[in-house]
Protein backbone atom coordinates (compact mmCIF):
# COMPACT_ATOMS: atom_id res chain seq x y z
CA UNK A 1 0.00 0.00 0.00
CA UNK A 2 1.47 3.33 -1.07
CA UNK A 3 0.58 6.53 0.76
CA UNK A 4 1.94 10.04 0.72
CA UNK A 5 1.62 12.80 3.28
CA UNK A 6 -0.17 15.73 1.77
CA UNK A 7 -1.80 18.92 3.02
CA UNK A 8 -5.45 18.72 1.96
CA UNK A 9 -6.85 21.37 -0.35
CA UNK A 10 -9.97 23.09 0.92
CA UNK A 11 -12.65 23.36 -1.78
CA UNK A 12 -15.62 24.24 0.43
CA UNK A 13 -16.11 26.43 3.48
CA UNK A 14 -17.71 23.42 5.18
CA UNK A 15 -14.90 20.99 4.55
CA UNK A 16 -13.86 19.00 7.61
CA UNK A 17 -10.87 16.85 8.47
CA UNK A 18 -11.31 13.16 7.65
CA UNK A 19 -13.15 11.38 10.40
CA UNK A 20 -14.45 14.55 12.04
CA UNK A 21 -18.18 14.28 12.65
CA UNK A 22 -20.63 17.06 11.92
CA UNK A 23 -23.26 17.54 14.60
CA UNK A 24 -26.80 17.10 13.31
CA UNK A 25 -29.44 19.40 14.72
CA UNK A 26 -33.20 19.08 14.56
CA UNK A 27 -34.59 20.27 11.22
CA UNK A 28 -31.29 19.76 9.44
CA UNK A 29 -27.64 20.30 10.21
CA UNK A 30 -28.01 24.06 10.42
CA UNK A 31 -25.72 24.69 7.43
CA UNK A 32 -28.28 24.58 4.59
CA UNK A 33 -26.19 21.90 2.84
CA UNK A 34 -26.90 19.60 -0.11
CA UNK A 35 -27.40 16.54 2.05
CA UNK A 36 -30.76 14.93 2.75
CA UNK A 37 -31.00 16.74 6.08
CA UNK A 38 -31.43 20.09 4.29
CA UNK A 39 -32.13 19.52 0.59
CA UNK A 40 -35.82 18.60 0.73
CA UNK A 41 -37.86 21.48 -0.67
CA UNK A 42 -34.78 23.47 -1.68
CA UNK A 43 -34.69 25.58 -4.84
CA UNK A 44 -31.62 26.47 -6.89
CA UNK A 45 -31.08 28.09 -10.31
CA UNK A 46 -31.22 25.60 -13.19
CA UNK A 47 -29.51 25.84 -16.57
CA UNK A 48 -31.00 23.28 -18.96
CA UNK A 49 -28.82 22.73 -22.03
CA UNK A 50 -29.91 21.35 -25.36
CA UNK A 51 -28.42 18.02 -26.34
CA UNK A 52 -26.87 18.40 -29.78
CA UNK A 53 -26.22 15.57 -32.16
CA UNK A 54 -24.08 17.49 -34.59
CA UNK A 55 -20.54 17.29 -35.82
CA UNK A 56 -18.09 19.29 -33.77
CA UNK A 57 -17.17 22.23 -35.96
CA UNK A 58 -14.82 25.16 -36.24
CA UNK A 59 -16.81 27.41 -33.92
CA UNK A 60 -16.96 25.05 -30.95
CA UNK A 61 -20.11 23.28 -32.11
CA UNK A 62 -21.94 23.53 -35.39
CA UNK A 63 -25.50 24.74 -35.02
CA UNK A 64 -27.96 27.48 -35.83
CA UNK A 65 -25.67 30.51 -35.85
CA UNK A 66 -28.63 32.88 -36.22
CA UNK A 67 -29.97 32.08 -32.76
CA UNK A 68 -28.28 34.30 -30.20
CA UNK A 69 -29.33 33.39 -26.64
CA UNK A 70 -30.25 36.35 -24.42
CA UNK A 71 -28.41 34.76 -21.49
CA UNK A 72 -24.84 33.78 -22.33
CA UNK A 73 -23.78 30.74 -20.33
CA UNK A 74 -20.22 31.68 -19.51
CA UNK A 75 -20.10 35.45 -19.26
CA UNK A 76 -23.53 36.21 -17.80
CA UNK A 77 -24.28 33.15 -15.71
CA UNK A 78 -21.25 31.23 -14.56
CA UNK A 79 -18.83 34.13 -14.18
CA UNK A 80 -21.54 36.50 -13.04
CA UNK A 81 -22.66 34.19 -10.25
CA UNK A 82 -19.04 33.45 -9.34
CA UNK A 83 -18.36 37.18 -9.07
CA UNK A 84 -21.40 37.50 -6.80
CA UNK A 85 -19.97 34.86 -4.43
CA UNK A 86 -16.63 36.66 -4.42
CA UNK A 87 -18.28 39.93 -3.43
CA UNK A 88 -20.13 38.11 -0.66
CA UNK A 89 -16.84 36.89 0.79
CA UNK A 90 -17.18 33.15 0.20
CA UNK A 91 -13.62 32.61 -1.02
CA UNK A 92 -10.68 31.97 1.26
CA UNK A 93 -8.52 34.54 -0.56
CA UNK A 94 -8.68 36.93 -3.51
CA UNK A 95 -7.31 34.95 -6.44
CA UNK A 96 -7.37 38.06 -8.63
CA UNK A 97 -4.57 39.46 -6.43
CA UNK A 98 -2.28 36.49 -7.13
CA UNK A 99 0.75 37.31 -9.25
CA UNK A 100 0.75 35.60 -12.64
CA UNK A 101 3.22 35.69 -15.52
CA UNK A 102 3.99 33.89 -18.76
CA UNK A 103 7.41 32.27 -18.52
CA UNK A 104 9.71 33.16 -21.45
CA UNK A 105 10.36 30.24 -23.76
CA UNK A 106 8.99 28.27 -26.69
CA UNK A 107 5.88 26.99 -24.92
CA UNK A 108 4.80 29.90 -22.74
CA UNK A 109 4.28 28.08 -19.45
CA UNK A 110 2.15 30.13 -17.07
CA UNK A 111 3.36 30.65 -13.49
CA UNK A 112 1.08 31.76 -10.68
CA UNK A 113 2.08 32.55 -7.11
CA UNK A 114 -0.80 31.26 -5.00
CA UNK A 115 0.30 31.15 -1.39
CA UNK A 116 -3.32 30.97 -0.25
CA UNK A 117 -3.59 27.32 -1.32
CA UNK A 118 -0.77 26.32 1.03
CA UNK A 119 -2.51 25.65 4.33
CA UNK A 120 -0.84 24.96 7.66
CA UNK A 121 -3.04 22.04 8.53
CA UNK A 122 -2.42 18.52 9.75
CA UNK A 123 -0.96 16.46 6.87
CA UNK A 124 -3.18 13.52 5.97
CA UNK A 125 -2.21 10.08 4.77
CA UNK A 126 -3.50 9.63 1.24
CA UNK A 127 -3.50 6.31 -0.61
CA UNK A 128 -2.12 6.69 -4.14
CA UNK A 129 -1.93 3.11 -5.42
CA UNK A 130 -5.66 2.54 -5.95
CA UNK A 131 -7.43 4.55 -8.64
CA UNK A 132 -10.81 3.10 -7.69
CA UNK A 133 -11.74 3.44 -4.04
CA UNK A 134 -15.09 3.07 -2.31
CA UNK A 135 -16.98 6.27 -1.49
CA UNK A 136 -16.76 7.03 2.23
CA UNK A 137 -19.56 9.25 3.50
CA UNK A 138 -17.67 9.92 6.73
CA UNK A 139 -15.03 11.88 4.82
CA UNK A 140 -15.67 15.25 3.22
CA UNK A 141 -17.88 15.04 0.17
CA UNK A 142 -19.91 17.50 -1.85
CA UNK A 143 -23.23 16.79 -0.13
CA UNK A 144 -21.71 18.81 2.75
CA UNK A 145 -21.31 21.90 0.57
CA UNK A 146 -23.53 24.82 1.57
CA UNK A 147 -26.30 25.62 -0.91
CA UNK A 148 -25.01 29.19 -1.13
CA UNK A 149 -21.80 27.79 -2.69
CA UNK A 150 -23.83 26.27 -5.54
CA UNK A 151 -24.14 28.52 -8.60
CA UNK A 152 -26.75 26.49 -10.49
CA UNK A 153 -27.97 23.06 -11.47
CA UNK A 154 -26.78 21.86 -14.88
CA UNK A 155 -29.01 19.38 -16.68
CA UNK A 156 -30.11 18.39 -20.17
CA UNK A 157 -33.32 20.08 -21.30
CA UNK A 158 -36.44 17.93 -21.36
CA UNK A 159 -38.06 19.72 -24.29
CA UNK A 160 -35.14 20.31 -26.62
CA UNK A 161 -34.80 24.01 -25.80
CA UNK A 162 -32.05 25.76 -23.86
CA UNK A 163 -33.67 27.20 -20.73
CA UNK A 164 -32.71 29.00 -17.56
CA UNK A 165 -34.82 28.85 -14.39
CA UNK A 166 -33.70 31.39 -11.74
CA UNK A 167 -35.32 29.24 -9.02
CA UNK A 168 -36.07 25.58 -9.68
CA UNK A 169 -36.95 22.81 -7.21
CA UNK A 170 -34.16 20.32 -6.57
CA UNK A 171 -35.25 16.91 -7.85
CA UNK A 172 -33.88 14.80 -5.01
CA UNK A 173 -35.07 11.52 -6.52
CA UNK A 174 -33.14 12.08 -9.77
CA UNK A 175 -30.00 13.51 -8.11
CA UNK A 176 -29.17 16.80 -9.84
CA UNK A 177 -25.80 17.74 -11.29
CA UNK A 178 -24.56 21.04 -9.87
CA UNK A 179 -21.91 23.68 -10.48
CA UNK A 180 -20.34 25.02 -7.26
CA UNK A 181 -17.52 27.40 -6.43
CA UNK A 182 -14.10 26.18 -5.37
CA UNK A 183 -13.41 28.33 -2.31
CA UNK A 184 -9.65 27.90 -2.89
CA UNK A 185 -9.60 28.99 -6.53
CA UNK A 186 -6.69 28.65 -8.91
CA UNK A 187 -8.07 31.23 -11.33
CA UNK A 188 -10.98 33.52 -12.04
CA UNK A 189 -14.22 31.57 -12.38
CA UNK A 190 -12.84 28.37 -10.79
CA UNK A 191 -15.79 26.03 -10.28
CA UNK A 192 -16.59 22.40 -9.67
CA UNK A 193 -18.98 20.36 -11.82
CA UNK A 194 -20.45 17.62 -9.64
CA UNK A 195 -22.48 15.05 -11.62
CA UNK A 196 -25.50 13.53 -9.86
CA UNK A 197 -24.28 14.89 -6.54
CA UNK A 198 -26.74 13.04 -4.30
CA UNK A 199 -25.74 9.63 -5.68
CA UNK A 200 -22.41 10.01 -3.88
CA UNK A 201 -20.40 8.55 -6.75
CA UNK A 202 -16.69 7.94 -6.12
CA UNK A 203 -14.09 9.72 -8.25
CA UNK A 204 -14.38 7.58 -11.36
CA UNK A 205 -15.38 8.44 -14.93
CA UNK A 206 -18.48 6.95 -16.54
CA UNK A 207 -19.98 7.72 -19.94
CA UNK A 208 -22.82 9.90 -18.65
CA UNK A 209 -20.64 12.03 -16.37
CA UNK A 210 -18.02 12.66 -19.03
CA UNK A 211 -20.66 13.59 -21.59
CA UNK A 212 -22.05 16.12 -19.10
CA UNK A 213 -18.60 17.69 -18.71
CA UNK A 214 -18.13 17.81 -22.48
CA UNK A 215 -21.48 19.56 -22.91
CA UNK A 216 -20.45 22.12 -20.31
CA UNK A 217 -17.40 22.98 -22.42
CA UNK A 218 -19.57 23.18 -25.54
CA UNK A 219 -22.19 25.31 -23.80
CA UNK A 220 -19.59 27.74 -22.49
CA UNK A 221 -18.54 28.32 -26.10
CA UNK A 222 -15.23 29.88 -25.11
CA UNK A 223 -11.81 28.32 -25.82
CA UNK A 224 -10.39 29.97 -22.71
CA UNK A 225 -12.79 28.03 -20.48
CA UNK A 226 -11.39 24.55 -19.83
CA UNK A 227 -12.47 21.59 -17.73
CA UNK A 228 -10.10 19.22 -16.00
CA UNK A 229 -10.32 15.88 -14.23
CA UNK A 230 -7.89 14.22 -11.81
CA UNK A 231 -8.24 10.57 -10.89
CA UNK A 232 -7.29 9.21 -7.51
CA UNK A 233 -3.56 8.60 -7.57
CA UNK A 234 -3.21 11.61 -9.90
CA UNK A 235 -3.87 14.28 -7.26
CA UNK A 236 -7.62 14.20 -6.87
CA UNK A 237 -8.05 15.18 -3.21
CA UNK A 238 -11.72 14.24 -2.73
CA UNK A 239 -13.21 10.85 -3.55
CA UNK A 240 -16.53 12.22 -4.80
CA UNK A 241 -17.02 12.49 -8.57
CA UNK A 242 -16.21 15.98 -9.80
CA UNK A 243 -14.59 17.98 -12.59
CA UNK A 244 -12.88 21.34 -12.22
CA UNK A 245 -13.12 24.29 -14.59
CA UNK A 246 -11.95 27.86 -14.86
CA UNK A 247 -11.37 30.74 -17.26
CA UNK A 248 -7.85 31.84 -18.26
CA UNK A 249 -7.45 34.10 -21.30
CA UNK A 250 -4.14 32.76 -22.60
CA UNK A 251 -3.36 29.57 -24.51
CA UNK A 252 -2.16 26.65 -22.41
CA UNK A 253 1.23 25.27 -23.50
CA UNK A 254 -0.32 21.84 -24.05
CA UNK A 255 -2.68 23.38 -26.63
CA UNK A 256 0.32 24.56 -28.65
CA UNK A 257 2.24 21.28 -28.55
CA UNK A 258 2.68 19.40 -31.85
CA UNK A 259 0.83 16.10 -32.31
CA UNK A 260 1.04 13.08 -34.57
CA UNK A 261 -2.04 11.16 -35.64
CA UNK A 262 -1.91 7.48 -34.73
CA UNK A 263 -5.49 6.28 -35.28
CA UNK A 264 -8.86 7.17 -36.75
CA UNK A 265 -11.97 5.33 -35.61
CA UNK A 266 -15.00 4.47 -37.72
CA UNK A 267 -17.01 7.03 -35.74
CA UNK A 268 -14.70 9.78 -36.98
CA UNK A 269 -12.74 10.26 -33.77
CA UNK A 270 -9.07 10.93 -34.44
CA UNK A 271 -6.49 9.97 -31.82
CA UNK A 272 -3.04 11.54 -31.80
CA UNK A 273 -0.08 11.50 -29.47
CA UNK A 274 1.75 14.53 -28.16
CA UNK A 275 5.22 15.32 -29.45
CA UNK A 276 7.96 17.39 -27.85
CA UNK A 277 6.13 17.83 -24.56
CA UNK A 278 7.43 16.73 -21.13
CA UNK A 279 4.36 14.58 -20.35
CA UNK A 280 3.38 11.83 -22.78
CA UNK A 281 -0.30 11.89 -23.62
CA UNK A 282 -3.05 11.28 -26.15
CA UNK A 283 -5.29 13.79 -27.91
CA UNK A 284 -8.85 12.94 -28.96
CA UNK A 285 -10.79 15.11 -31.43
CA UNK A 286 -13.40 14.99 -34.17
CA UNK A 287 -16.17 12.45 -34.21
CA UNK A 288 -19.43 12.38 -36.12
CA UNK A 289 -21.34 13.42 -33.00
CA UNK A 290 -20.61 14.91 -29.60
CA UNK A 291 -21.56 11.61 -27.99
CA UNK A 292 -19.20 9.69 -30.28
CA UNK A 293 -16.26 11.76 -29.09
CA UNK A 294 -17.41 11.62 -25.47
CA UNK A 295 -17.89 7.85 -25.45
CA UNK A 296 -14.48 7.22 -26.97
CA UNK A 297 -12.57 9.25 -24.38
CA UNK A 298 -14.70 7.99 -21.48
CA UNK A 299 -14.06 4.39 -22.58
CA UNK A 300 -10.34 5.17 -22.57
CA UNK A 301 -10.64 6.59 -19.04
CA UNK A 302 -12.60 3.55 -17.86
CA UNK A 303 -9.85 1.35 -19.28
CA UNK A 304 -7.23 3.21 -17.24
CA UNK A 305 -9.36 3.00 -14.10
CA UNK A 306 -9.95 -0.71 -14.49
CA UNK A 307 -6.22 -1.25 -14.96
CA UNK A 308 -5.36 0.91 -11.92
CA UNK A 309 -3.49 3.55 -13.94
CA UNK A 310 -3.76 7.12 -12.55
CA UNK A 311 -4.59 9.77 -15.13
CA UNK A 312 -5.59 13.37 -15.80
CA UNK A 313 -7.89 14.80 -18.48
CA UNK A 314 -8.12 18.28 -20.01
CA UNK A 315 -11.18 19.30 -22.07
CA UNK A 316 -10.12 22.18 -24.30
CA UNK A 317 -11.21 24.16 -27.39
CA UNK A 318 -14.91 24.25 -26.41
CA UNK A 319 -14.89 20.45 -26.19
CA UNK A 320 -13.25 19.93 -29.58
CA UNK A 321 -10.02 18.49 -28.16
CA UNK A 322 -9.52 16.29 -25.13
CA UNK A 323 -6.08 15.48 -23.71
CA UNK A 324 -5.51 12.28 -21.72
CA UNK A 325 -2.41 11.87 -19.54
CA UNK A 326 -1.61 8.61 -17.75
CA UNK A 327 0.83 9.58 -14.98
CA UNK A 328 3.01 8.19 -12.21
CA UNK A 329 4.26 11.15 -10.10
CA UNK A 330 2.43 10.23 -6.88
CA UNK A 331 3.67 6.66 -7.15
CA UNK A 332 7.25 7.86 -7.60
CA UNK A 333 6.78 10.23 -4.68
CA UNK A 334 5.54 7.45 -2.42
CA UNK A 335 8.48 5.25 -3.44
CA UNK A 336 10.99 8.02 -2.72
CA UNK A 337 12.01 8.34 -6.36
CA UNK A 338 11.36 12.08 -6.80
CA UNK A 339 14.20 14.56 -6.34
CA UNK A 340 14.00 16.34 -2.97
CA UNK A 341 14.34 19.73 -4.64
CA UNK A 342 11.15 19.09 -6.63
CA UNK A 343 9.33 17.84 -3.54
CA UNK A 344 10.28 21.01 -1.67
CA UNK A 345 8.22 23.07 -4.11
CA UNK A 346 5.12 21.24 -2.79
CA UNK A 347 3.63 21.41 -6.28
CA UNK A 348 1.23 18.57 -6.97
CA UNK A 349 1.32 18.14 -10.76
CA UNK A 350 -2.35 17.56 -11.55
CA UNK A 351 -4.24 18.45 -14.74
CA UNK A 352 -3.61 22.22 -14.63
CA UNK A 353 0.12 21.91 -14.00
CA UNK A 354 0.45 19.21 -16.67
CA UNK A 355 -1.35 21.50 -19.11
CA UNK A 356 1.21 24.23 -18.40
CA UNK A 357 -0.42 26.37 -15.70
CA UNK A 358 2.08 26.06 -12.86
CA UNK A 359 0.49 26.93 -9.52
CA UNK A 360 3.41 27.75 -7.22
CA UNK A 361 3.17 28.08 -3.45
CA UNK A 362 6.51 29.71 -2.65
CA UNK A 363 7.66 33.15 -3.77
CA UNK A 364 11.16 31.77 -4.38
CA UNK A 365 9.85 29.27 -6.93
CA UNK A 366 7.78 31.97 -8.63
CA UNK A 367 10.71 34.35 -8.95
CA UNK A 368 12.95 31.59 -10.31
CA UNK A 369 10.30 30.10 -12.60
CA UNK A 370 11.69 29.05 -15.97
CA UNK A 371 10.71 26.78 -18.82
CA UNK A 372 13.55 24.47 -17.83
CA UNK A 373 12.24 24.13 -14.26
CA UNK A 374 8.69 23.51 -15.44
CA UNK A 375 9.91 20.91 -17.93
CA UNK A 376 11.98 19.16 -15.25
CA UNK A 377 9.01 18.84 -12.89
CA UNK A 378 6.60 17.63 -15.56
CA UNK A 379 9.07 15.10 -16.92
CA UNK A 380 8.76 13.29 -13.58
CA UNK A 381 5.01 12.99 -14.16
CA UNK A 382 5.28 11.16 -17.45
CA UNK A 383 5.27 7.44 -18.04
CA UNK A 384 8.36 6.03 -19.74
CA UNK A 385 8.13 5.56 -23.49
CA UNK A 386 7.84 1.77 -23.11
CA UNK A 387 5.15 1.98 -20.42
CA UNK A 388 3.26 4.60 -22.40
CA UNK A 389 3.12 2.29 -25.43
CA UNK A 390 1.85 -0.55 -23.22
CA UNK A 391 -0.91 1.71 -21.88
CA UNK A 392 -1.81 2.83 -25.41
CA UNK A 393 -2.21 -0.79 -26.45
CA UNK A 394 -4.61 -1.37 -23.56
CA UNK A 395 -6.65 1.69 -24.50
CA UNK A 396 -6.95 0.79 -28.20
CA UNK A 397 -7.89 -2.80 -27.41
CA UNK A 398 -10.61 -1.59 -25.05
CA UNK A 399 -12.01 0.95 -27.50
CA UNK A 400 -12.11 -1.64 -30.27
CA UNK A 401 -13.96 -4.16 -28.10
CA UNK A 402 -16.43 -1.75 -26.52
CA UNK A 403 -17.53 -0.06 -29.76
CA UNK A 404 -20.76 -2.08 -30.04
CA UNK A 405 -18.73 -5.26 -29.96
CA UNK A 406 -17.60 -4.66 -33.53
CA UNK A 407 -13.93 -4.02 -32.82
CA UNK A 408 -13.92 -1.26 -35.41
CA UNK A 409 -11.01 0.89 -34.30
CA UNK A 410 -8.99 1.41 -37.46
CA UNK A 411 -5.39 2.56 -37.38
CA UNK A 412 -4.46 5.01 -40.10
CA UNK A 413 -1.37 4.60 -42.22
CA UNK A 414 0.92 7.49 -41.39
CA UNK A 415 4.02 9.13 -42.67
CA UNK A 416 6.71 10.68 -40.52
CA UNK A 417 5.63 14.11 -41.70
CA UNK A 418 2.05 13.73 -40.44
CA UNK A 419 2.57 16.23 -37.65
CA UNK A 420 0.54 19.30 -36.82
CA UNK A 421 0.55 22.15 -34.37
CA UNK A 422 -2.65 23.86 -33.24
CA UNK A 423 -3.22 26.94 -31.14
CA UNK A 424 -6.32 28.32 -29.54
CA UNK A 425 -7.55 31.36 -31.45
CA UNK A 426 -7.57 34.61 -29.55
CA UNK A 427 -10.92 36.04 -28.53
CA UNK A 428 -11.93 39.53 -27.63
CA UNK A 429 -12.72 39.91 -23.96
CA UNK A 430 -15.68 42.07 -23.03
CA UNK A 431 -16.46 43.94 -19.88
CA UNK A 432 -17.03 42.26 -16.51
CA UNK A 433 -20.04 39.94 -16.68
CA UNK A 434 -23.26 40.83 -14.95
CA UNK A 435 -25.02 38.47 -12.59
CA UNK A 436 -28.06 36.72 -14.06
CA UNK A 437 -31.18 37.75 -12.24
CA UNK A 438 -34.85 38.17 -12.80
CA UNK A 439 -38.28 37.27 -11.59
CA UNK A 440 -39.30 35.14 -14.57
CA UNK A 441 -40.23 31.56 -13.86
CA UNK A 442 -38.17 30.52 -16.87
CA UNK A 443 -36.04 32.10 -19.55
CA UNK A 444 -36.03 30.37 -22.91
CA UNK A 445 -32.69 30.80 -24.66
CA UNK A 446 -33.29 31.00 -28.39
Image (cartoon, grey):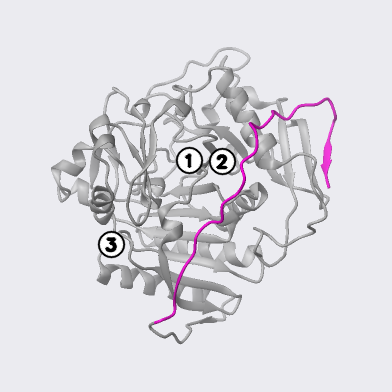
Left or right: 33 in relation to 311:
right
Answer few, some or many: residues within 10 Å of disc 1's Cα (few below 14, many 20 plus, some between 14 and 19). many
- Report the side of 135 relative to 40 (left or right): left
Depth check, front residue: 340 or 441: 340
Q: Is residue 325 left or right of residue 85?
A: left
Q: Is residue 34 visible?
A: no
Q: CA distance from mark 2 to mark 3?
A: 29 Å
Determine the residue positioned at 48% across, 78% down: 263
Query: In what element is the residue under mark 1?
Result: loop
Query: Gap between marks 3 and 1, in whole Å?
Result: 26 Å
Q: Residue at x 44, y 29 (%)?
A: 184
Badge 3: how crowded within 10 Å, few (<14), some, or many (20+)?
some
Q: Is residue 271 magenta?
A: no
Query: In the depicted view, which residue is nearer to us: 149 or 259?
Result: 259
Q: Position of residue 412 (x, y in %)?
A: 48, 84
Q: Which residue is mark 3?
A: 383
Task: Examine the structure image and report whether residue 423 is included in the region drawn in magenta.
Answer: yes
Tag of residue 424: none
239 to the left or right of 376: right
**Image vertical order of residue 95 relative to residue 333, above or below:** above
Is the residue under label 1 in contact with that under label 2 (CB below 8 Å)?
A: yes
The mark nearer the N terminus, 3 or 1, is 1
Asked if the residues shown at circle 3 and circle 1 are in contact, with their CB atoms under 8 angstroms apart, the answer is no
Q: Which residue is mark 2?
A: 194
> Could you say which disc has been placed on residue 240 in the image?
1
Q: Is residue 116 visible?
A: yes
Numbered disc in front, either 2 or 1: 2
Amino acid sequence: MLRIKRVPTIVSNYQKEEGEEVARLGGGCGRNCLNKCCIQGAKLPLYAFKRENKIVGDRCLAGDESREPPVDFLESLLLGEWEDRMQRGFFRYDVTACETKVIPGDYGFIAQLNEGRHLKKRPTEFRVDKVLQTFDGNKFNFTKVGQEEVLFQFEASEDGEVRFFPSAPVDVENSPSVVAINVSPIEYGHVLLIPRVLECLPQRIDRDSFCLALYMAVEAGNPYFRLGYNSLGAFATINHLHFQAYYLAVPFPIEKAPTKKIATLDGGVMISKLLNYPVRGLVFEGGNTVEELSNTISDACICLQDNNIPYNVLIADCGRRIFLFPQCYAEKQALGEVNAELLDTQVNPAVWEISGHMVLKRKKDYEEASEENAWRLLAEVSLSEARFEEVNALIFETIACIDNGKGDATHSSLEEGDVKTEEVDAITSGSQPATVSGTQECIVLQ
